Amino acid sequence: MKKTSGILRSGEDLLAAFQFLTRIPMPSVEFEADSLARATKFFPIVGLAVGSGAVMLQWLLLPHLNRAIVSLAVLLYLVLITGGLHEDGLADVADGFGGGWNKEQILLILKDSRIGSYGAASLVLSLLGRYLLLAALPLQHFAGYVISAHVLCRWSALPLSYFLPPARTTESQGARIARLTSLSSLLIGSAISFLIVLFALRSAALAPILFALLLTALSGWFYSRKISGVTGDCFGATNQLTEIAIYLCGAWQA
């Protein structure tokens, strides 16, 4: 009975991860106070599913369309399947840290739903950069790098949420997992992520893993220094930067 209950809880946590990170229709589950914190260990699995969908789309379209149009279609799929969740985080962080002079100003700008010049520029650069890098990935390694990018960019939320407190004392998306992710979730999620990347890239896996570790550590240090913690937007910004970095690894090796 206890084992069955544990399996059921894990299934609910997996569904919660998909519900939070994607727009894929899922069976409804009842959210509890710690549902999202428990679900973080499955964030890399969501990345595996999203990345696999991108690979499948590329495989279906490439015989019929040129590489540039296929890359645009893949990028459009990636934005739509997440509802622009991470793009929104990147834009807010660019506006907040670009326009705020202190913690209070930064957090105030982060809450503002309007987009400023820093946010608009970051969105344009992110979309353009990902489009060009997707088109530049070697075809024989496209699947490995795309899947690895989406696994590792979602993994980045685990160490950030384990080590850093919420920047706001009020209820927020970031506060639902910041300092609430358990050590077991961090270890399980990390093991899942690195094993998937090792399987996908074999001997080429070291550089993407190191880039993900470095970007997560540097962004965590930056957030801690500027706002003494993290917000939901911070998770999205680090996610975007990590995705771009892994694509760059593949294009660089090509």
Image (spheres, helix red, strand yellow):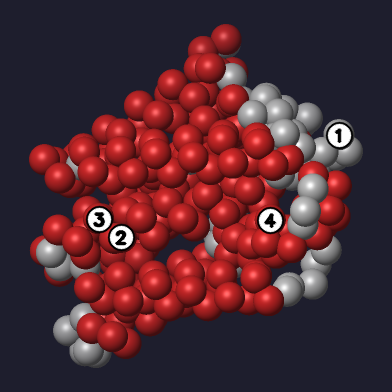
Q: Disc 4 or 1, which lies upstream in sequence?
A: 4
Residue that label 1 marks? 169
Tag in front: 4 or 2:
4
The residue lying at 67 percent from left, 25 percent from top is 179
Going from N to C along the chain, the mark reached first, 1 or 3, is 1
Q: How packed is label 1: few (under 14 Cα within 10 Å), some, or many (20 or more)?
A: few
Residue 13 pos. (x, y %): 59, 34
What amino acid type is highlighted by mark number 1?
Thr
Kindly state the secondary structure of the residue where label 2 is placed: helix
Whole-angstrom CA distance, mark 4 to mark 2, is: 25 Å
Mark 2 touches mark 3? (CB < 8 Å): yes
Which quadrant of the rendered structure holds the N terminus?
top right
Q: Are marks 4 and 2 in contact (CB under 8 Å)?
A: no
Residue 186 position (above or below residue 39): above
Q: Which residue is mark 4?
A: 97
Residue type at the position of mark 3: Cys
Of labels 4 and 2, earlier in sequence is 4
- Secondary structure type for disc 1: loop
The one nearer the camera, 245 or 223, is 223
